Amino acid sequence: MVLYAICALSKGWSRSSAGRAIANTWLLTQAAVDITRRRDERRPVIQAIRRMLMALLLTIALFGANKGQADFPDEQARATEGQMTDDERFAMIISFHGSIGGLNGVRDKRIPADVSMSAGYTPGVPRLGVPALHMSDASLGITNPGYRPDDKGATALPASIAVGASFNPRLARDGGAMIGREARIRGFNVMLAGGINLARDVRNGRNFEYYSEDPYLTAVLGAEAVNGIQGEGVISTLKHYTLNCNETNRHWLDAIIDPAALRESDLLAFQIAIERSQPGSIMSAYNKINGEYAGGSNHLLNEVLKGVWGYKGWVMSDWGAVPQWDFALAGLDQESGAQLDMMMWKVEPFTGPLRKAYAEGKLPKERLSDMVRRILRSIYAVGIDKWPPAPNVDMAKHNAVALEIARQGIVLLKNEGDLLPLAADKPLKIAVIGGYAQLGVPTGTGSSAVLPVGGYAIPIGGPAIVEDLRNLFLLPSSPLAELRKLLPKAKIEFDPGQTPAQAVWLAERSDLVIAFGIRVEGEGYDLADLSLPGRQDAVIEAVAAANPNTIVVLETGNPSSMPWRDRVKAIVQAWYPGQAGGQAIAEVLTGRVNPSGRMPITFPVDLAQTPRPTLPGLGASWGTPITIHYDEGAEVGYRWYAKQNLKPMYAFGYGLSYTTFEYTDLNVSGGDTVTVTFKVINTGKVTGADVPQLYLTEAPNEKRIRLLGFERVELKPGESRQVRLEPADSRLLARFDGKAGQWQIAAGTHRIALGKSARDLVLTGSVDLAGRLFRK
Ligand code: BGC
């Protein structure tokens, strides 16, 4: 029995969790006890043996649990790698981009005929039980940009920036789990998810794929998305490591920043997210950081990620981001989509050149083994080598996940005279104008774009989705149709909003106007300015002049300039709200859902307020080297506005509700870090959710603002709740000393505030902290 238990313990049951290990061993222990009990209940010697046996087994269990969690994947990876040939090793450190009529229109022969197309394919080693890697994008649902003709579509979640606006980690996890399940049924075992770059620049085409401008909020949500995916047995990345905060000519972009400031901001988001979710892989970014490509940065990969942070998974490149084989020496473990490197740099560095370097002794054997072991380790740690039967996927439930994220992500920015919510029992005459609201809601474009079940509402211009081939993609969830469902007594008419003069006709004969403003944003390019394309701003301006009861719904991934802001009564920021977005918008407008989203990024009054009124390189032709100085350093977003003493248009953390909330009884305790308790009360007339936010506002000798914690609290009218915000992550209270390579919390009084946004600080307190230095 004991032998059986030891064998079982050493064989691999402990693949992913100590809890499972203990549970399994407990079962074995019980079996042993049952057998001895059956033999003879009365004999004291047997009872003593039984007790010893139990003690022994429990010791093994606890030892095995710790061992299983900490070392097992490493040991298994080491054992497997030791049995591999060099050919097998080299095959594992590269992935090929799958294409049917895609890149060059030719299927790459290195992808076997029976392998389904994907963003990346790496062969397995069947004789050693190592599965092939099948990779797909990812963060907003399973994509299929023309690779798999038999794939009829997946659940299209709202943009990650909407998850950011929900301030709700549980939703991020639900979205991740949904993605994991839809990946499983397609055979994808690696998700290129977890986009956690900070929204540093309001023109960045990919901000919709990221969560926020704040490292902590971003990290918490990104980590939960990864936990959701990996909880379904699918590896997830966190990406793009790091500072890929603008898209223009990203392959030639040199992002300049003070290294210490980077540790306090973009890298801190990665560090916290990695600690909270143990992603199987990290995808390095396209750009350079301080003159060195992200994928070839010894400092960022070997020293920080794998060294100081002790990251054990593998680093894959972004697609077409590896010009040289010696990135392998700097810490890159896998070249992704190798054919894209051939297109970009006329070389596939990890095939021929890396093998040559190996033969010449320039790539040490130990490094090659390490690259392979890191991949194997994640395979074993997440368990993609032993998939249980595919899960049942209930698309209706997945639609409900998309709907809930959209609902909680919508931010009510303005609601003068409580024009919203719209009363369902009145025979209102409503004008719905623009934004293709009769057809659906837009999505961001690029590698994250998800083809929904049933296809896009209007596939203008074909399937191309990246860079110069950008198009408008509408998910077929029509706000107009949904409004008609929820307001059966109203007379709702639609005008496409093509010209101001025409839109005014309908506005004038209506009781109120709901005008939609949309903008396509996406991968590979940045916005020239914050206006709404075409004549949308002029249309809104005109209808607002014609009808004082104008509501604007914005479907964008970034702020817009809103020149008409003072002349409309209500503004709703709906982001790219996903496949159930039309329904969520209608529910918020009619009060079925009380808006609870909060701004995950600051909306500036204009670009002049931002750190870079002019963005270097905008409009430069493909291939032009660009240098962007991120001189704001760690003072990203709301921290920049506070430091410059600027009042933005809408602050980080801001968002209205149809009810009101009050905070009382703030208690703060110090020591090593800050912990607070306080009470939130719903003082209004309807149920709603609030997101109280805790900020550091001053450290000894330094005024600086920093989000330390938050919690989404749902309350009925009159209800109150005591909230305790978990002890703040020490790094949020510290500054990083680049020379010493250490975090430093200054000893002394720190001021904190509980707020409704980064600018609306309601209760304040102060706390004494012990000074401290720490490395990680
Ligand atoms: C994007 C990545 C994506 C990859 C594979 C790249 O262009 O930057 O985010 O995962 O393509 O599709």
Image (cartoon, rainbow, N blue to C red):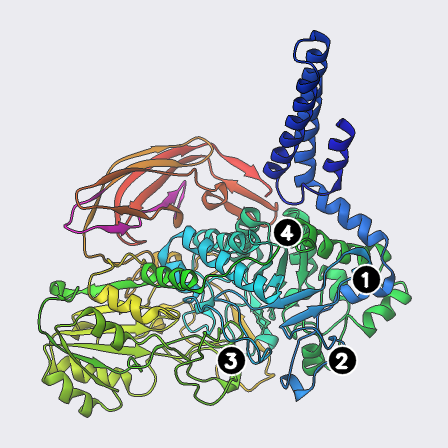
Residue pointed to by mark 3: 617
Q: Residues within 10 Å of mark 2 (few under 14, many from 20)?
A: few
Residue at 40 percent across and 70 percent down: it is: 202
Amino acid on which the number 1 mark rests in the picture: Arg
Residue pointed to by mark 4: 382
Relative to residue 334, is residue 529 depicted above or below? below
Relative to residue 168, is residue 576 depicted above or below? below
- The magenta-colored residue range is 681-704
Q: Upstream in the sequence, badge 4 or badge 2?
A: 2
Is residue 303 among what the camera can see? no
Q: Which mark lies nearer to you, 1 or 3?
A: 1
Q: Is residue 195 left or right of residue 251?
A: left
**Quadrant of residue 639 in the image?**
bottom left
Relative to residue 478, is residue 661 depicted above or below? above
Q: Is residue 132 left or right of residue 354?
A: left
Q: Are marks 1 and 3 in contact (CB under 8 Å)?
A: no
Amino acid on which the number 4 mark rests in the picture: Val
Question: What secondary structure is marked by label 2?
Answer: loop
Question: What secondary structure is marked by label 1?
Answer: helix
Distance of label 4 from label 3 (alpha carbons): 41 Å
Give coordinates of residue 316: x percent, y percent.
67, 63
Is residue 580 among what the camera can see? yes
Distance of label 1 from label 4 (alpha carbons): 20 Å
Q: Which mark lies nearer to you, 3 or 2?
A: 2
Amino acid on which the number 3 mark rests in the picture: Gly
Question: What secondary structure is marked by label 3?
Answer: loop
Residue pointed to by mark 2: 109
Residue pointed to by mark 1: 89
